[in-house]
Image: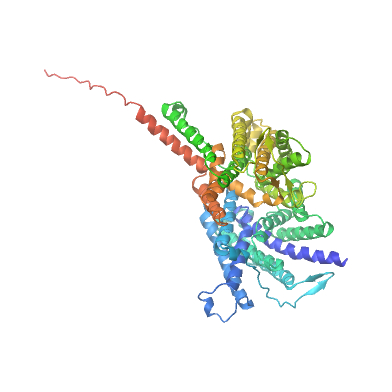
Amino acid sequence: MSQFLSYLEIGISNGLVYGLLALGIVMIYKGSRTLNLAHPYFGLVAAFNCWWLTSKADFFPFTLLPFKNDSNARFVIAVVLALLAAAANGQFIERQIIRRLRQAPRLVVLVATIALAQGSVGAVQLLFLRTKVQGETFRRLPVLLPVTTRFHLGARTVTAADIQVLIVAPLVCVALALFFTRSKFGVGIRAAAENSEAARLLGISADRVSVFTWVVGALLAAVAGILITEVRGTLDIGTLSTGFLVRGLAAALVGGLTSLPGAMVGGLLVGVAESLMIEGFSNVRGVPETVLLLLVLGFLVFRPRGLFGQTEQTEDKVAFVPTMKELPARLRDTAAAQGVRVIASAVVALLLLVPLFTGSKTNGILVTVVVFSIVAVSLTVLMGYAGQVSLGHWGLVGVGAFSLASLVTRVGMPYLLALPLTVVVGMAVSLVIGLPALRIRGLYLAVATLAFNLAAEFFIFRSRVVGGSAGVSLRQPGIGPLHLSTPTYRPLFYFAVVMLGLSMVVARNLARSRTGRGFFALRENEKAAATLGVGLTRYKLLAFAVSGGIAALAGAVNVTYFGLAQSEQYPTELSLALVALVMIGGLGSLSGSVFGAFLVFGLPNLVHFSNGWIVPTGTGALLLIVIVRARGGVAGVVQGLRERLVRGLDELATPPPAATAPTGGGGGA
């Protein structure tokens, strides 16, 4: 019994922090209808700001303060400054980004928050973890309560950090409850969230409501980030990133995405369920992540409004990007267009010869670019063609990697036979993931796929049946006498290019078929597609199956390159980066898949810009530019330039019409 109580206390302590994070998520969602995937990163930045201002800051006016580093007084000042910075950050994001996207589909805004998350990670790495010494520094935050403030509950010691959470979180909840029930502005915000049109008629500004909810949401995330760092006893990016996000989202969904009290209840339920499952399955790794997946799927499928939320009308328009345009029919067969195609083909052919003249390091990077290009093609089919969201696609790549390695190494199957079976396994797993899409869509489906990747990373791939902690090695792969994993990686590169070509052919033929037209109708408007006789169930599951098969193929190439499949190779964060990749390249464009993979994963490594902060910062910035300014991505820009070039060349090659001699009369009388 005492052990049960100790785990219950851990669950309550963690659950209160998850509840605070979920409160901010719900606040922002109610105020601007934005599901903010960057939410825990407010807490990440605030916690690092606190640590630096408490332990490292040695500039004016801190040099004038009579407080030593790591003292409680200095920590209080640091907390105040970190909270002010979080509030300012929330206000800036709402005014400069969210407000510009007010008329965009909600899924586009969701992707914009992925860009903010990427940028936040890059900023933290740039400011606080840039050097090796900074990266190896042990970081912690002090606790305001005396260290002696503790008591024993069974075998567990309830520390001062736990007690601080038990004090601070309820106080924050009480303060918010009083504000929303007793103050005029608080009541107005609630009214605006419930009915924006009625609130506008009453003179309540939607802009004020939106910016206020972003500011308060950022503050709540900052408080949650600081509290969880104190409880964990160490400060690192992993504690305050994707895992923290999924727990906050799960709490918000369980309680109801439109209910503030429900957020706290959901947080407590998630925290307690997670803790008690750890107690019951202490020898099984990844249990908390599996609990999150089951909770999220259960509530989304059977009670999508949560325990206390209200039923919402889902958005019918899900298209992310303008449809990619081909050349006008008049220009398609001109000599100028044919010349541009010949030049483009020649450039591609020359690029394919590069690995013949480069070493193993460069060729390895190029293999990685091709792998990410294949994954991007699979996402193009699912998101660009069918409009179905996936934030867990890197998990499907892991499914392919573990499947191929197991079939070849454990079963003893020949590589060429194991490869198509790996694709079939990927299709089957993706079909299972796609089943919730029959009941849920849009933002909810995004959360479900994100939870899948987290469970795959920490539970499925680490289970003894699949891989265990050591993973699964792949014995020397080959196609007949040809070994793929040579030291130069040249055979593997060209094999990967062939796999990329096959996946692009499948995707292109699919887009031009009747099935592709069904996908596009599904993407543009589900209700309209259904009225036209499009079988939603069939097309959704088919999109997931094809996309999953291509993603598994990418995983097969990936494990062939590394020679080992391990859970650490398939982190959930990369699934978010993949969405950024396809958006930057141009979602809906197959060539954009290659552009995006090269820009995000190839170029930084080839030019030795592989520092930890450059890729997330650059990816976040590029993605925001694409969403706000150029929704078609790099491919859209290239296609526009191509059309201008072809038009210009065609006009130069076309002779001007012959001038006609003026007809006139002459003559007088």
Q: Position of residue 223 (x, y in %)?
A: 65, 66
Question: Residue at position x 71%, y 61% from top?
Answer: 19
- Give percent across and percent down for residue 127: 55, 63
User: What residue occupies the far bottom of the structure in this picture?
Assistant: 66
In this image, 617 relative to 175: left or right?
A: left
Image location (x, y in percent) of residue 645: 41, 35
Name of the residue lying farthest toward the right: 1
Q: Is residue 273 visible?
A: yes
Quadrant of the snapshot with the N terminus = bottom right
Please, which residue is most extreme toward the left here? 669
Q: In the rendered picture of this protein, how many numbered marks are placed on residues?
A: 0
Could you say where residue 130 lies in the image, as x and y percent from the top left?
56, 62
Residue drawn 18% across the image and 19% down it: 665
**Coloring applied to the structure:** rainbow
Residue at figure coordinates x 52%, y 57% from the top left: 95
Quadrant in which the C terminus appears = top left
In the rendered structure, the answer to whether residue 176 lies left or right of residue 163 reads left
Residue 596 versus residue 648: which sits nearer the camera?
Answer: 596
- Does residue 439 appear in this view? no
On the image, which quarter does residue 50 sit in?
bottom right
Residue nearest the observer in this picture, 178 or 26? 26
